[in-house]
């Protein structure tokens, strides 16, 4: 009996290999994952194929909502706007087919985001915490721009101002305190899950750290929070940013309003625990904001917007490389089509840039002050760039803040020099347009209008 199962498994695996291999071309690439991840996917494949574990039962939104309800011990989602994005994304993942590790991680992501949505709603109904809704989010700065244009670096610089605050990864992923009156214990407990998840991610794709640094105690993107309404994260980036995606047509106002509530909750927690000075402004960041700035300012009416710019001939291939790494993590059971990633991101970039441009052209500087930052300026003169932003947005640039920036930039320079010595000057993150079926001429032709509008004076 056991021998027959092994033979059957071998036949199925070999047939699947031939089927997948038949559709390959010059842009087909095996996923770049560690040998440990390959071994685990191979070991877990029978469990996934025969659905021998709860982790591998087909994903259905209604069933996952029930599981989330049990986890949160609360059942009022308060709105249903999240259902269309979640349902479409879940069905698309089922259609694509993820690897055993990827499927289990994606399912866990959906359930946890739904549970967090419920836990936030429950927390804000508690008489002890409900006053959080009376604390406004005043004049937050939102950093946005295409991925790979310096948004992370700028975000972290802006977050160093003693008068500002950026949400940390563990806070965004799990914003409800477990221990309200024991900050140290609460922080450790909430950060522990994310730290373990990141350890697993780094085990699967060790090279991801060279592309995007993520840490439980580092400032992170808003999507970690509003992923409870728009399910965007590493597990879904390559699904949502495709030509056939419905993502571009979803309504984001509700997601931003719910995110506003999360920030109110975090402000109130800090006030109760005395961990942050009152009145600090939020410094927030996410490239995806570029798609929905009109919706963002409906929820954050006095938001300040900073848009980072970089030559698309560099930004798009780098973005492709990032997306390929995300796909490595989750679709590790088959070949990845690099040219498809290139096509998808040309389409995605076109929509993002046009939406951002439309907002900047029509938005009032009085209502929502906004400014642009060139990647070259940011890298060449970080302190001067931040000073210019503050002057344009009406913030005070203090001597204390300047010293903090200067000290950080020098330490960062030394750290980068040490990495260069260890690697012999070898680049840790390699990519090109041609790897993804694109050419510089093609990118220039499609986005010439953008370069003329935002980059021409820098050429």
Image (tube, grey):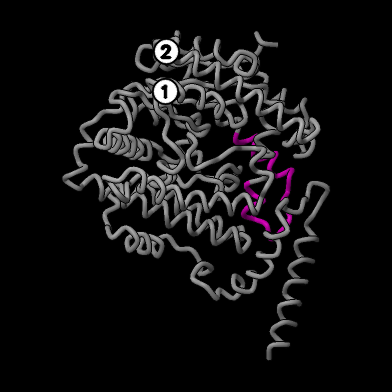
> Mark 1 near mark 2, Cβ–Cβ under 8 Å?
yes
Choose the circle earlier in sequence order: 1 or 2: 1
Residue sitting at x 77%, y 50%: 29
Residue with the mark numbered 2: 393
Indicate yes or no whether the magenta region holds residue 271: no
Is residue 310 visible to us here? yes
Q: Which residues are magenta?
A: 326-348
Q: Position of residue 162 (x, y in %)?
A: 40, 21
Q: Nearer the viewer, residue 119 or 414?
A: 414
Q: Position of residue 30 (x, y in %)?
A: 76, 54
Q: Is residue 128 left or right of residue 369?
A: left
Image quadrant holding the N terminus, namely: bottom right
Q: Position of residue 197 (x, y in %)?
A: 53, 52
Q: Quadrant of residue 313?
A: top right
Residue with the mark numbered 1: 141
Tell me if residue 236 comes above or below residue 251 in the rendering: below
């Amino acid at each position: 009996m056991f021998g027959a199962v092994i033979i059957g498994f071998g036949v199925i695996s070999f047939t699947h290999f031939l089927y997948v291999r038949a559709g390959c071309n010059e842009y087909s690439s095996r996923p770049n994952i560690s040998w440990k991840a390959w071994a685990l996917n191979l070991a877990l494949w029978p469990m996934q194929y025969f659905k021998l574990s709860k982790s591998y039962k087909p994903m259905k939104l209604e069933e996952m909502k029930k599981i989330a309800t049990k986890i949160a011990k609360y059942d009022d989602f308060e709105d249903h706007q999240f259902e269309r994005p979640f349902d479409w994304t879940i069905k698309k993942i089922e259609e694509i087919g993820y690897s055993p590790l990827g499927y289990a991680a994606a399912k866990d992501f959906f359930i946890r985001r739904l549970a967090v949505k419920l836990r936030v709603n429950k927390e804000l109904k508690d008489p002890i915490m409900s006053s959080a809704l009376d604390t406004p989010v005043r004049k937050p700065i939102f950093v946005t721009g295409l991925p790979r244009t310096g948004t992370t670096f700028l975000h972290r610089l802006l977050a160093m101002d003693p008068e500002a605050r950026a949400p940390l990864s563990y806070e965004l992923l799990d914003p409800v305190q477990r221990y309200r009156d024991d900050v140290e214990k609460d922080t450790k407990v909430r950060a522990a899950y994310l730290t373990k998840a990141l350890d697993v991610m780094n085990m699967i794709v060790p090279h991801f750290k060279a592309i995007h640094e993520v840490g439980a105690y580092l400032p992170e993107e808003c999507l970690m929070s509003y992923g409870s309404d728009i399910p965007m994260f590493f597990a879904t980036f390559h699904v949502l940013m495709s030509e056939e995606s419905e993502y571009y047509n979803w309504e984001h106002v509700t997601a931003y309003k719910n995110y506003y509530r999360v920030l109110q909750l975090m402000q109130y927690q800090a006030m109760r625990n005395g961990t942050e000075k009152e009145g600090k402004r939020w410094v927030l960041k996410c490239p995806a904001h570029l798609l929905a700035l009109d919706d963002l300012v409906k929820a954050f009416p006095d938001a300040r917007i900073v848009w980072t710019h970089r030559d698309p001939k560099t930004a798009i291939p780098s973005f492709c490389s990032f997306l390929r790494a995300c796909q490595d993590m989750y679709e590790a059971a088959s070949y990845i089509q690099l040219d498809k990633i290139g096509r998808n991101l040309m389409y995605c970039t076109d929509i993002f840039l046009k939406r951002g441009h439309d907002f900047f052209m029509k938005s009032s500087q009085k209502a929502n002050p906004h400014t642009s930052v060139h990647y070259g300026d940011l890298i060449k003169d970080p302190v001067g760039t931040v000073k210019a932003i503050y002057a344009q947005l009406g913030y005070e640039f203090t001597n204390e803040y300047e010293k903090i920036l200067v000290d950080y930039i020098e330490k960062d320079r030394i750290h980068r020099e040490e990495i260069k010595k260890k690697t012999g000057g070898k680049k840790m993150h390699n990519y090109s347009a041609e790897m993804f079926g694109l050419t510089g001429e093609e990118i220039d032709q499609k986005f010439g209008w953008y370069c003329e509008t935002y980059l021409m004076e820098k050429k």
